Image: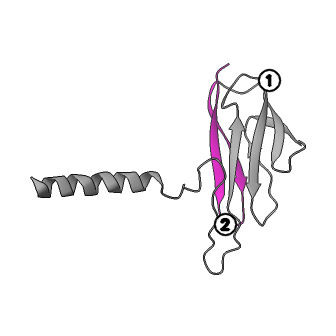
Amino acid sequence: MRVKGIIMGAATGAVGLAMFATPAASASGPVDCDPNPGSTGSCGWINVEPDVVHRGDVVDVEARCLNAEAYPVSDVLLNFTPTAEPTHWSATVSRKARPGEHTATITCPENTYTTTFLVVR
């Protein structure tokens, strides 16, 4: 009985640790940057708010590459315009956007970061 409890405890601990693992390059939101030797340290993030939109809506895009200059791109977001904050842009959802999932990306020297959002009509 004690051995079974130890094994269950270890499995639960492993699942708990996995929840705190470093996000993948495609994750949205700020990413901690711990560069490897020889790295430029240019990790980044991108996020679109709201993440459920209609054609013609104006959205807030937060995107940044640390230690590098880069700009967000998307197949259906138009007219990226910087706002007062250096990592924020406003953009308009194309009136020709098809309903469904779309992406916005920012390409840093070492990785490309992607987020998804949903156009509902």
- The span shown in magenta is 99-121
- Judging depth in this view, the residue of 109 and 63 nearest the camera is 63
Looking at the picture, tell me which residue is in the foreground, 49 or 5: 5
Q: How is the image coloured?
A: one colour
Q: Which residue corresponds to mark 2? A: 110
Q: CA distance from mark 1 to mark 2?
A: 33 Å
Q: Is residue 53 visible?
A: yes
In which quadrant will I find the C terminus? top right
Q: Is residue 46 above or below residue 111?
A: above
> Residue 32 got which mark?
none
Magenta highlight on residue 42? no
Amino acid type of the residue tagged 2 in the rendering:
Glu
Q: Quadrant of residue 48?
A: top right
Q: Residue 56, which numbered label?
A: 1
Task: Tell me the residue at 74%/59% (across/down).
Answer: 65
In reply to whether residue 114 is colored magenta, the answer given is yes
- Direction from residue 55 to residue 8 in the image, left or right: left
- Image coordinates of residue 81 in percent, x first then y, are 89, 41
Which of disc 2 and disc 1 is earlier in sequence? 1
Up/down of 37 relative to 120, above or below? below
